[in-house]
């Protein structure tokens, strides 16, 4: 008989919750002022997948 080859187990998706809209939002403090609009903004970034969203305050 031949040699038995062991396969590595597949890694689960880390984006499972994010794919369905359940992000973990953290506030980004890098950029807090929108120069073009001249307004203060709050930038959020998902801790898992890195998607960003901006909300005017």
Image: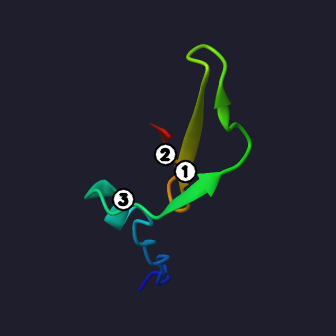
Mark 3 vs mark 1, foreground winner is 1
Disc number at residue 32?
A: none
Rendering quarter of residue 36: top right
Circles 3 and 2: CB atoms closer than 8 Å: yes
Q: Tell me if mark 3 has few (under 14), some (14-19) or many (20+) residues whose alpha carbon lies within 10 angstroms of its own.
A: some
Cα distance between the residues tagged 1 and 2: 6 Å
Most foreground residue, 54 or 18: 54
| Residue 54 vs residue 38, the one in the foreground | 38
Q: Which sits in the foreground, 4 or 52?
A: 52
Mark 3: which secondary structure? helix
Q: Is residue 55 left or right of residue 20?
A: right
Reading the image, the residue beneath label 2 is 51
Quadrant hosting residue 43: top right
Asked if disc 3 and disc 1 are in contact, CB closer than 8 Å, the reply is: no
SS at mark 2 in the image: loop
Q: Nearer the viewer, residue 23 or 8?
A: 23
Q: Residue furthest top?
A: 36
Mark 3 — residue? 18
Residue 41, horizontal then vertical, whole percent = 57, 37
Q: CA distance from mark 3 to mark 1?
A: 12 Å
Residue 42 coordinates in the image, percent (x, y): 56, 44
Find residue 45 and name its label. 1
Compared across the picture, whether 6 is left or right of 21 comes to right
Residue 46's x, y, as percent?
Answer: 51, 55
User: Considering only vertical position in the picture, is 46 above or below 54?
Assistant: below
**At 46% across and 72% down in the image, what residue appears?**
11
Q: Position of 51 compared to 13: left or right?
A: right
């Amino acid at each position: 008989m031949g040699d038995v080859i062991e396969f590595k187990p597949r890694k689960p998706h880390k984006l499972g919750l994010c794919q369905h809209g359940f992000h973990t939002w953290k506030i980004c403090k890098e950029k807090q002022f929108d120069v073009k609009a001249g307004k203060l903004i709050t930038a959020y970034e998902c801790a898992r997948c890195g998607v960003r969203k901006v909300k005017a305050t």
